[in-house]
Amino acid sequence: MPIVEAISVTKTYQLGDTAVNALDGVDLAIAKGDFLALTGPSGSGKTTLLNLIGCLDLPTMGEVRIDGTSTAALGEAALDQLRGRTFGMIFQSFNLIPVLNVHENVALPLHLHDVSADERRARVTRAIAAVGLAPFAASLPDHLSGGQRQRVAIARALVTEPRLILADEPTASLDSANAFSLIELLQTLNRDNGVTFVFSTHDDRLLRNVRDVVTLRDGRVQAARRLPEGELVS
Ligand SMILES: Nc1ncnc2c1ncn2[C@@H]1O[C@H](COP(=O)(O)OP(=O)(O)OP(=O)(O)O)[C@@H](O)[C@H]1O
Ligand SMILES: [Mg+2]
């Protein structure tokens, strides 16, 4: 069974008298181990779809199911819990706390989880090592490059060991060399650690060797392809 399933999902925003169909009948399934990129022009619905998959928002029509259960059937509290157990999020702008060092930033989401101090330290150390930042654990975000900061945000998403990590344009604030190495890191975490990722990007060059790519246009799935996984070429 997929972790998340979108079934004929429609999202309509009301702007004054005009209804904007941000999503218009999208079907998508995400299974354990997937590495899926959402692409498409600005306004095609990528962020809207990621928000619906991550249960930050509910569809106007259609259904989002997590482990087969429709999110529409759940109350606010149950949905919150499910969200915390299921998803990790990475944002375009990193969202790090400037007065906390790398270790402390990565530890933040664990304060909402019931883990002992020892376990917390071990998990944070592991997540920081997984993104190659062990020597920077005591550094403040301001002393890191953009690429390193985004790696901290990835470590923070990994630390709760979520079943699915959602990333909205995680490379948008990076130059192209850093963007490539970031996607490479996500691929390595997917291949070696079995982390499931769904991310969005505008950048076609980043997608050449990504296994699954779904292209949105005007809120519809325009194309979906599945390629054998390979190394990224820059
Ligand atoms: N809160 C909102 N209120 C009204 N309209 C919205 C809202 N959020 C998104 N939209 C509209 O829905 C459509 C899809 O927007 P969305 O942000 O999902 O696109 P996107 O593919 O993520 O674009 P970008 O590449 O620029 O991030 C757009 O037409 C947008 O203007
Ligand atoms: Mg967007």
Image (cartoon, rainbow, N blue to C red):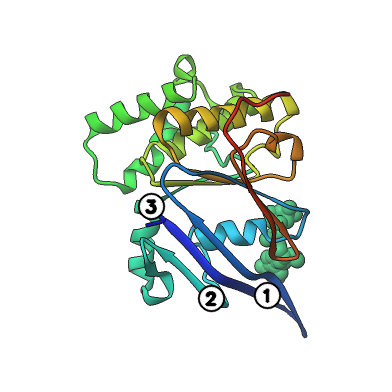
* Mark 2 Cα-neighbour bin, 10 Å: few <14, some 14–19, many ≥20: some
Q: Which residue type does callout 3 highlight?
A: Thr
At which x and y percent is residue 90?
A: 54, 43
Q: Are marks 3 and 2 in contact (CB under 8 Å)?
A: no
**Residue shown at 40%/30% (left/top)?**
193
Quadrant of ligand 1 in image: bottom right
SS of the residue at dot 2? strand
Mark 1 CB in 8 Å range of ligand 1? yes
At which x and y percent is residue 185?
A: 55, 27
Q: Which residue type does callout 1 highlight?
A: Tyr
At which x and y percent is residue 20?
A: 73, 75
Q: Are marks 1 and 3 in contact (CB under 8 Å)?
A: no
Q: CA distance from mark 3 to mark 2?
A: 21 Å
SS of the residue at dot 1? strand
Quarter of the figure that contains the C terminus? top right
Q: Earlier in the sequence, mark 1 or mark 3?
A: 1
**Residue at which label 2 appears:** 62
Question: Which of the 4 image quadrants contains residue 109?
Answer: top left
Mark 2 CB in 8 Å range of ligand 1? no
**Residue at which label 1 appears:** 13
